[in-house]
């Protein structure tokens, strides 16, 4: 069959138009679609709550009391996300997860967000298919022992038992650092959850216990005699702790990421839960954009225009959250967890 040039040209034009969307306003439609909530963000808005995976056993980060109330930096981040997305910081369903359960819970959709003192590593970012939001706590692995043990460094652990949590980076870090120190004989005593780990240590099943330094200090604070235990002046690793979501959902990942940045940026601006309303009349265009007074940064993300203001008003900026949960009760100095303007590592990209 022979095709006429006119017919062939028409077919080619139709194919081109079909590939491009077929209409001149297809780009506008695509842009409109990008501003609408989709995937997990849409599902969260529909169900009216954020399901957040936490530890529940670490004071200062996420700890559940006998009444079932959760407190801590990690728990408050969940609340900030709920405030930003749903306008209500209390619309959070906390799920207590073990170190072995946490990634599966995210991958299967059991939880929307993991905010559970979790270290960001290459393997977790790739093979495990997590996407990590900004680091909210810069930590390092440490070792705790009793003052009477005589243990002051790694070499003193030769031939001794060390309690360690299963399914964490601490197991491998401990083995690596022991090898570097030339400690050839030590016995790892492995536990499946945080409570079991510190119970084993307090029962004398091991001479020392290793975990993130912040966790060691937090758990020591609820020992019967915390003054009898010391955190050694040794750091075994870098432990950047960050919230995480499942890979492959950019709208939800952007939401979690920019809520984290909002907590940091609010502190840099000097905006607190107590003064956020007064800042809405600021002449500073950066502040006005940040709080949603002008521009449409929230709308472009599929969020309320004042998502940052809601998070700050209901939960506080990063400094408030840190001081309330970690600074005052545990006595942990800000250190690396200070703003970049104060010699720390916390730094937010521009809200513009």
Image: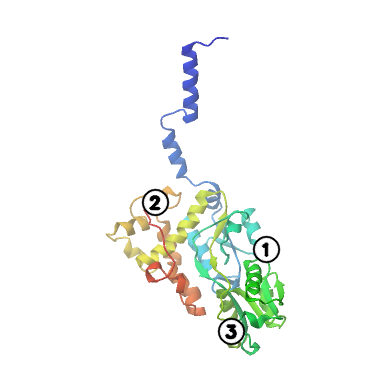
**Mark 2 or mark 3, earlier in chain:** 3
Q: Is residue 32 visible?
A: yes
Q: Position of residue 81 (x, y in %)?
A: 49, 59
Secondary structure at badge 3 equals: strand
Of the two numbered discs 2 and 3 in the rendering, the one whose residue sits closer to the viewer: 3
Closer-to-camera residue (76/228) = 228
Q: Is residue 271 visible?
A: no
**Mark 1 or mark 3, earlier in chain:** 1
The CA distance from mark 2 to mark 1 is 37 Å
Q: Position of residue 177 (x, y in %)?
A: 62, 72
For label 1, the crowd category at 10 Å Cα-Cα, with few meaning under 14, some 14 to 19 and many 20 or more, is some
On the rendered structure, is 29 left or right of 190?
left
Secondary structure at badge 2 equals: helix
The CA distance from mark 1 to mark 3 is 28 Å
Look at mark 3 in the image and give the residue it sits on: 230
Above or below, 255 against 34 in this view is below
Query: In percent of the image, x 47 and y 41: which residue is there?
Result: 33
1 and 3 marks in contact (CB < 8 Å):
no
Label ID, residue 297: 2
Q: Image quarter for residue 56? A: bottom right
Look at mark 1 in the image and give the residue it sits on: 100
For label 2, the crowd category at 10 Å Cα-Cα, with few meaning under 14, some 14 to 19 and many 20 or more, is many
Q: Position of residue 16 (x, y in %)?
A: 47, 25
On the rendered structure, is 348 left or right of 153?
left
Closer-to-camera residue (116/298) = 116
Closer-to-camera residue (156/296) = 156
Query: In percent of the image, x 35 and y 68: which residue is there?
Result: 270
Q: How many marks?
A: 3
Q: Position of residue 171 (x, y in %)?
A: 66, 69
Closer-to-camera residue (287/83) = 287
Farthest-out residue, left? 283
On the rendered structure, is 170 left or right of 278?
right
């Amino acid at each position: 069959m022979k095709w006429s040039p006119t017919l062939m040209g028409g077919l080619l034009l139709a194919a081109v138009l079909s590939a491009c969307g077929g209409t001149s306003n297809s780009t506008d439609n695509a842009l409109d679609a990008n501003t609408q909530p989709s995937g997990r963000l849409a599902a969260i808005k529909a169900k009216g709550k954020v399901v957040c995976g936490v530890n529940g056993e670490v004071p200062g980060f996420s700890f559940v009391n006998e009444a079932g109330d959760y407190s801590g930096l990690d728990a408050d981040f969940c609340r900030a996300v709920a405030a930003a997305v749903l306008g209500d910081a209390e619309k959070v369903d906390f799920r207590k997860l073990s170190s072995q359960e946490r990634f599966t819970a995210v991958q299967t959709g059991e939880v929307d967000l993991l905010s559970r003192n979790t270290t960001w590593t290459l393997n977790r970012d790739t093979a495990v298919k997590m996407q990590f939001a900004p680091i909210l706590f810069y930590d390092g692995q440490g070792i705790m022992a009793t003052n009477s043990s005589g243990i002051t460094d790694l070499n003193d652990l030769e031939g001794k038992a060390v309690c360690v949590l299963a399914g964490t980076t601490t197991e491998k870090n401990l083995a690596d650092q022991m090898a570097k120190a030339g400690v050839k004989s030590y016995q790892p005593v492995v536990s499946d959850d945080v409570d079991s780990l510190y119970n084993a240590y307090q029962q004398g099943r091991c001479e020392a216990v290793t975990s993130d330094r912040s966790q060691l200090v937090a758990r020591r604070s609820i020992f019967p005699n915390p003054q009898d235990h010391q955190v050694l002046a040794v750091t075994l690793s870098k432990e950047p702790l960050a919230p995480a979501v499942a890979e492959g959902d950019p709208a939800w990942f952007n939401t979690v990421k920019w809520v984290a940045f909002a907590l940091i940026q609010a502190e840099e601006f000097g905006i607190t839960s107590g003064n956020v309303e007064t800042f809405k009349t600021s002449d500073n265009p950066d502040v006005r954009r940040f709080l949603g007074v002008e521009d449409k940064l929230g709308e472009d993300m599929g969020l309320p225009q004042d998502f940052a203001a809601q998070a700050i008003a209901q939960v506080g900026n990063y400094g408030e959250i840190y001081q309330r949960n970690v600074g005052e009760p545990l006595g942990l100095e800000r250190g690396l967890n200070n703003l970049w303007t104060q010699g720390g590592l916390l730094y937010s990209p521009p809200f513009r």
